[in-house]
Image (cartoon, coloured by chain):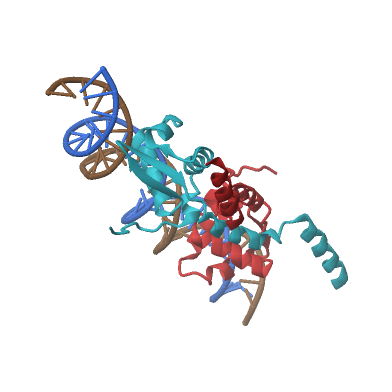
Chain colours: A cyan, B red, C brown, D blue
Amino acid sequence: MNESNPLRDVFDAIADPTRRRLIRLLAEAEELPLHELTAQFQMGRTAVSKHLTILKEARLVLDRKVGRETRFRLNAAPLSEVQDWVAFYSKFWSTNMMHLKHLLEEEEE
Amino acid sequence: MNESNPLRDVFDAIADPTRRRLIRLLAEAEELPLHELTAQFQMGRTAVSKHLTILKEARLVLDRKVGRETRFRLNAAPLSEVQDWVAFYSKFWSTNMMHLKHLLEEEEE
DNA sequence: TTGACAAGACACCAAAAGGTGTCTTATAAT
DNA sequence: ATTATAAGACACCTTTTGGTGTCTTGTCAA
């Protein structure tokens, strides 16, 4: 068994609204087969499958075969990278920080 | 004065590593002109300018002309949308939640 | 055992993304 | 007055993205 997956950037994976909706659906449902996921969208099965492949490459979903269907489940862990990234910048917009910044600028004058 | 900007998705704007690095540079430097930003990359000025345009469309940067240079500054506020989004899924990977989930599953049996 | 269903594997396509280079126009410096 | 710098505006190119349709294979149900 080989992990031949190309390893995709998480920020890239969540950039597409369809993929964010897939993540949402999987968060709500624990485990879903491809055809049920496809039913939620207007696009065809092939397109949804491609999106799921991208999510897999980013390790955001796991899949397993059950009978003739392929079931997907969420693996949210890689999203921690996004959380860490955005947390760094939160100091630049939080209202507390705005207030603090204002005070500091007054002191400088 | 017209806001003719196409309004770009924040998730889309932060998907590109070059743009994330631009955000980082602007976070560190308060305000920087295009040519100084360009000096940090291997690509040409036009390419960097295009990335900054995309960041502008997502309202992540502001620009003003000063003499012959165009200076950019960070506006991190739109990142709160990302923070809110990812916060929702943090319950699916935090170790506390893993523990709690485990307990709940034990109860079900 | 014959159908119907789920999904993988392709081939294909249009549009968008991410670069490049060149030309022009302000502005600053000499 | 002249030259150098900063950057906008384009035209252009290649690769990636996001979708389609078709063919095949495996699995379940009648």
Examine the image and state in which quarter residue A73 appears. Answer: top left
Q: Decide if residue B95 is on the left or right side of residue A5.
A: right
Q: Is residue A88 above or below residue C30?
A: above
Asked whether residue A108 appears in the rendered view, the answer is: yes
Examine the image and state in which quarter residue B35 appears. Answer: bottom right
Image quarter in which the C terminus of chain A is found:
bottom right
Image quarter in which the N terminus of chain A is found:
bottom left
Residue nearest the viewer, comparing B57 with D18: D18
At 70% from the left edge and 44% from the top edge, which residue is drawn? Answer: B1
At 50% from the left edge and 49% from the top edge, which residue is drawn? Answer: A14
Q: Decide if residue B2 is on the left or right side of residue B15.
A: right
- For the image shown, how many numbered marks are present on the structure? 0
Residue B101, x across and y down, in percent: 57, 48
Asked whether residue B68 appears in the rendered view, the answer is: no
Residue A57, x across and y down, in percent: 39, 53
At 79% from the left edge and 58% from the top edge, which residue is drawn? Answer: A96
At 53% from the left edge and 68% from the top edge, which residue is drawn? Answer: B38
Q: Is residue A14 above or below residue C6?
A: below
